[in-house]
Image (cartoon, helix red, strand yellow):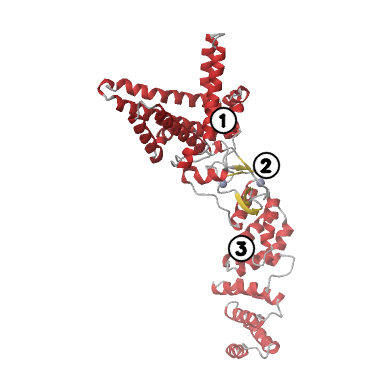
Amino acid sequence: MSITCTLHRSEPAHFQCDECGSSLCDECISLRETSGFSGKNRDYFCPACELPARMIGLGNVLEPFWNRLGAIFLYPLQPAPLLLTLVLSIIGALFAGWGIVQLLVWIVMVKYAYASLIHTAQGSLRAPPVTWELINQNVLQVFKQFVVFAIIAACVGFVAPFSPIAAVALIFVVAACLPAIIMILVASNSILQAVNPALFVPIIFRIGWAYLLMYLFLLFLLGAPTALFAVLPVELIHPRILFFLQLFLSQLYSIICYHLMGYVLLQYHEEIGYSVDYEYFAANRGGKKQLKAKTQEAELATGLALLIKAGKFQEAIARLRPAILEDNPDPELSEKFFQLLKMTGEKSKAEHYVIRHFEVMATNGKKQKAIELFDEVKRSPVGAPSGKSVYQVGIWLQERNQFKKALEVFAYFTKYHKKDARAPEVYFNVAKLLHEQADNSAKAKQILQGILKTFPRHELVPQVREYLAVLA
Ligand SMILES: [Zn+2]
Ligand SMILES: [Zn+2]
């Protein structure tokens, strides 16, 4: 893993945005599903720019093969391949002298090994199930592999009469290149491309030392059965059982080889030019969860985090604006918008926006935040927030016994919302606060009389009279 997610430094990036330079993990990427003529389209977008993102080679996401040699070695011991190799080896051993049976056993095995390669190369680390289709279909693929071997053998045969040394050298070279040749055959499905040295030689160099490592592992594995038979008391074992063991081990070996080649093909698919279906890969790698389309809110949150991280505050403001213009914007987004306006040094814009921000906070019951904002609201050169929100904040302050501040807020209300339906109540509150908290009974009296005069029919009138009586 060389490229990590911009927001999650411990996660490998799966996509890259060429527009903003963000690297995106599978949590951060935005999946968008659209219905087209050919069914559902799944596209990957950068949540910051809302533009298509580019898939990074999966080699960046995958654990390199040299770190999971153990798992690769154990691959054929999954139930499906284990059962298949056991059955095929038993059949092979029972019909030891039957050429046609041996051939059939061999074809089925090669077919399965080949399927393991393709399965792995597409991103599934679980062995393919043994099905009739798997054995029966795409026989051509396997046939093509034998045509490739035949071509190689013909080349060696052609060179041999002229120079036996050259022929031996050629065998060594071909043996060294064989995994690359098979990988190209899978990637291109073309015999001509597979046997073209101009293709397989550069690929070996592009994979580099990892190719050598893979090769050494294959050679080491090849030696394992030989080593095993060297220590077994071969002469004491029944020839049929010995034959069974040889078959069984060689089949396990084939599956490991093809699985490893598939893994290398997957890990280096970018270098080799093999296209991997990201969806299939995402759905199959080690049972990790499948990618789902994110909610608009989640997408926006990620997009903003990316833009802010990149210091693109103006872009973040632009990205947020549609959500802010909605009827009742999310208070957190509103707060972010407000902070961004301040961060960009747009003092006048922040001074304007604080009015709406205060309303959003009050409407959504964000008491502390709304109370904190009041001083900025007071300083704002543009009109006042709605009467409802100012009234609400005044009430909260009263509930918190912050009477001085409550008085200030109610006084502000009376300045801007004289005609509001809540005005009589606010005046009454102001009077009570003046008398009880500010020691200004004269002013309180004056206000109470003002209420009676201005709103003679209001439902609060009896209470106001009662209070006046107490004052007098
Ligand atoms: Zn972007
Ligand atoms: Zn991420």
Does label 3 or label 2 sit earlier along the sequence? Answer: 2
256 or 282, nearer to the observer: 256
- All told, the count of numbered labels is 3
Is mark 2 in CB contact (under 8 Å) with mark 1? no
274 or 287, nearer to the observer: 274
Give residue 439's position: percent from left, percent from top. Answer: 60, 79
Instruction: Identify the element where label 3 is drawn.
Output: helix
Q: Amino acid at mark 3?
A: Pro
Give residue 346's position: percent from left, percent from top. Answer: 72, 55
The residue pinned by badge 1 equals: 185
Residue in view at x 36 percent, y 22 percent: 226
| Label 3, ligand 2: CB separation under 8 Å | no
The residue pinned by badge 3 equals: 331
Instruction: Identify the element where label 1 is drawn.
Output: helix
| Structural distance between the alpha carbons of marks 2 and 1 | 32 Å
The mark lying in front, picked from 2 and 1, is 1
Determine crowd level at label 2: few under 14, some 14-19, many 20+ residues with C-alpha closer than 10 A: some
Kindly identify which numbered label has been placed on residue 18: 2
Q: Going by the image, does 175 lie left or right of 336?
A: left
| Structural distance between the alpha carbons of marks 3 and 2 | 32 Å
The mark lying in front, picked from 3 and 2, is 2
| Label 2, ligand 1: CB separation under 8 Å | yes
Q: Quadrant of residue 206?
A: top right
Q: Is residue 375 above or below residue 14?
A: below
